[in-house]
Structure formats: C-alpha cells, structure tokens
Amino acid sequence: MDILFELFLPKEINIESLGLKEVFVEWAGERYSQEPKKFQWNDSLIFEEYKDTAGYHNIIGNDIILEESRCYTLQGNALNQFQALICEERDLANHGICLFFNEFIAKITNWIILILIDYDQFDKIYNINDINEAFYLLERSLHPENIEGIALVKK
C-alpha cells in the first residue's frame, strides 16, 4: 500500500525562513535548482514541489484556492517509518514528522495536509483548530486497523 503525504501552503509564505530549505545541485562550481524543486527540513524530511495540482479540486474542492498555494510532496521512507512506529505503538515524539508538525506546521496560519492511500483513496475532510488535533488525526488515519485518506484543513 502506498501512502501519499501532500502539504499545501499559501504562496506568500517564506518557507525558507521557517526552515524548509531548497536542495540545490552543484555543477562546475555553480548551484542550480532541481526540477522539480526539492526542499529539506531539519536534515530529516525531503519534500518535492508538485505543480500539477488541478486534480485536487475533486478532493478538497473549495477548501483551498489551488492557484494561491504551492504543493509539496513528502519523499523518501519517513512516512513508512512513521506508520511502522504507529503499528508498534512506539513513541512518535522524536520522529521527523512529529517534529515537523510541532516546529514547522504549527507556525503557519493556514494549510492543508492531504493523505491519499494508493494515490487516490480519500475518505474525509477535517477542519483543524490546533496542531495537536491535526497530529492525532494523522496518526489515527495511518493506523493499519482503520487506514483512511484524509485532508487536514487549517484556515
């Protein structure tokens, strides 16, 4: 089962000031952006900017104006590791995703996190009031006994 973690942020946010740094490639002493752009947070999570977001209107509808947002897809095995910790009922507090929620997402006023199962299973939209609620719902949605695709919407 493949799980997709998408983060939608308003374009006007300076993500670099919040610690999400672009990863460049170097060639002949010059630094270049990658295509698609990649971003790293806290040496633990890698995100790739995703520009083809038109299909998300069917999922999140009017909860976000896609043209005013940037989408970042979590790369690597961090989400699989996170889910394994959930299955084993181990402490999540020091995992990169938990830290990302507490140290990055918590500083942003409005955002959407979209979890898709096998790239298209989507079950429910949750309007979020605080970061603890968001993290709880993420953890619950990834539990193997009741896995579900969700959108966490913070306005």
Image: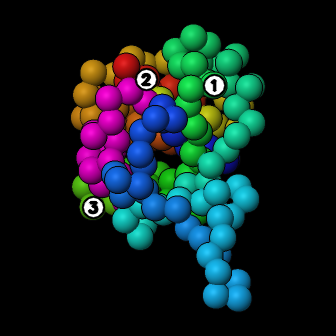
Residue that label 1 marks: 67
Instruction: Estimate the x, y position of residue 52 in percent, counting from the top left.
Output: 75, 36
Say whether residue 110 is magenta: yes
Q: Which amino acid, mark 2?
A: Val
Q: Is residue 141 magenta?
A: no
Q: Secondary structure at mark 1?
A: helix
Q: Earlier in the sequence, mark 2 or mark 3?
A: 3
Name the amino acid type tagged 1.
Answer: Glu
Q: Coloured how? A: rainbow
Instruction: Name the residue type under label 3.
Output: Asn
The one of 33 and 47 positioned closer to us in this rendering: 33
Mark whose residue sits in front, 2 or 3: 2
Residue depicted at 41% across the width and 55% down the height: 16
Foreground of the two, 154 or 79: 154
Q: Residue 39, how many percent across, how many down?
A: 53, 59
Q: Which residue is mark 2?
A: 153
Which residue matches tag 3? 94
| Label 2: which secondary element | strand
